Image (spheres, coloured by chain):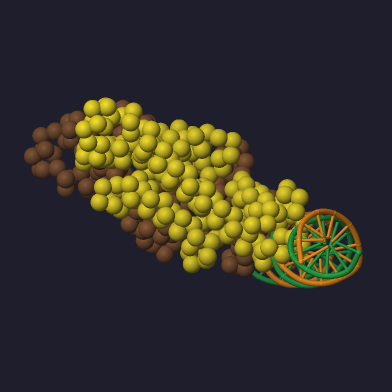
Chain colours: A yellow, B brown, C orange, D green
DNA sequence: ATTAGAGTGAACAAATCTGTTCACTTACTA
DNA sequence: TAGTAAGTGAACAGATTTGTTCACTCTAAT
């Protein structure tokens, strides 16, 4: 991908997240990124296309992070939480793998906790964009729904028997924590949600 | 309050909720309400003031409904769920009142369920408005935070020993359900949250 | 019957928004 | 070295935004 195009998408993503999608004008994105207007419209046929590209980038960031969190806690957390004995005997008994799966999922909430307490937290791009576009069948809203579903699918894959019901419950806790952190400013909400998730699993 | 002003606020609330706050122009509100622009600016010094008035109205609607749901389930639900014996002996034992308090709180999720499945559901006004205004200290965001806090306070008042920790948990479930219903279109989310709340109490 | 309050309608201002166009520059490469 | 792809800068169009102003109407109360 052309570097200017990439830079444009990254700048747009940041500004859209912080200031909103309607409130962020094309001109601000251009000024902030140092790209010319002609270049923008060479790469994107409209502002809406730029929004979709920014959401696509964010989607990839979130999914990548989610996967690596689950994978990392697969390798490290597991070995810390189980005794050597258990690991040596049979690391893949039902009891052992269930315990591991739980810890993997709970690690998600530690990620959320970091995010909420960072300087770059302005709520979830997808929740926010859904607030601004009315039509549920608008490409932007379809993409947001798809993104949220993808997250729940990854969680379900981590649960015994792909329990999609329980995955939805964890997804609900994640959404709740995000909103609580963003609209009420309660940054500890991820830990509150983690407690609830622990009780759930 | 002048009837034209009231009508303006009601129309604005509906349109802001459905189409968003930036996307809804003054002209649309005027056309839809049949009020003239001069009248609008006689009652409100800016669009922002109109937004705040609309949020104030919504705040009152939600709080009123929440209170009456809790009060209603106080009178009816209680008598259905307890035996006559229990009612006759002592309706205000700890066990009895705790049971009642639980049912009152769970009734909230039935309200949410109705809301999500109605034609007028376009997400929560306060979550949505927070998505559009960046500054957390902006009057609009302060109002949204205050509204959310008021709800949790009412829930806490219903819990034994004003358990604000548990109230926050229930609040988190409510937010999660709203987002799940709005961005993913999963309207049954209120019942999912109700299950989780039941387990919690 | 007159006055006052509330509302209307239409024009207007000024800023801002998205999107287009074009002549020019820069850098790489065949 | 000539050609090509990518980007720039600035002007421009056209629509849309919020907000102001003013002459006028309608209605209700004095």
Where is residue B108 shown, x and y percent of the image? 33, 47
Looking at the picture, tell me which residue is in the foreground, B114 or C20: C20
Where is residue A163 shown, x and y percent of the image? 28, 51
- Look at 38% across and 50% down and name the residue there: A154
Please identify the quadrant where the C terminus of chain A is shown: top left
Q: Is residue C19 left or right of residue A114?
A: right
Where is residue A106 shown, x and y percent of the image? 36, 37
Q: Is residue B74 left or right of residue B136?
A: left
A4 over B96 or under it: above or below: below
Q: Is residue A54 left or right of residue B69?
A: right
Looking at the picture, tell me which residue is in the foreground, D4 or B174: D4
Answer whether residue B95 is visible to the viewer in this image: yes
Looking at the picture, tell me which residue is in the foreground, B76 or A77: A77
Q: Quadrant of residue B9?
A: bottom right
Please identify the quadrant where the N terminus of chain A is shown: bottom right
Where is residue A67 shown, x and y percent of the image? 43, 46
- Look at 22% across and 48% down and name the residue there: B76
- Look at 59% across and 35% down and name the residue there: A119
Q: Is residue A30 left or right of residue A95?
A: right
């Amino acid at each position: 991908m052309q570097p200017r195009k990439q830079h444009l998408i990254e700048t747009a993503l940041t500004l859209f997240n912080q200031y909103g999608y309607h409130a962020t004008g094309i001109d601000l994105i251009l000024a902030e990124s140092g790209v010319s207007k002609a270049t923008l419209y060479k790469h994107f046929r409209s502002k809406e296309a730029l929004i979709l590209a920014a959401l696509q980038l964010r989607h990839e960031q979130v999914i990548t992070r989610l996967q690596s969190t689950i994978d990392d806690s697969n390798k490290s957390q597991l070995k810390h939480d189980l005794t050597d004995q258990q690991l040596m005997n049979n690391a893949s008994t039902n009891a052992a793998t269930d315990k591991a799966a739980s810890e993997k999922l709970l690690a998600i909430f530690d990620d959320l906790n970091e995010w909420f307490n960072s300087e770059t937290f302005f709520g979830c791009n997808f929740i926010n964009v859904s607030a601004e576009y009315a039509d549920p069948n608008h490409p932007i809203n379809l993409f947001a729904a798809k993104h949220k579903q993808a997250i729940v699918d990854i969680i379900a894959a981590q649960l015994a028997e792909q329990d999609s019901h329980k995955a939805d419950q964890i997804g609900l806790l994640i959404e709740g924590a995000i909103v609580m952190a963003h609209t009420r400013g309660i940054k500890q909400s991820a830990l509150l949600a983690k407690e609830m998730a622990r009780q759930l699993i």
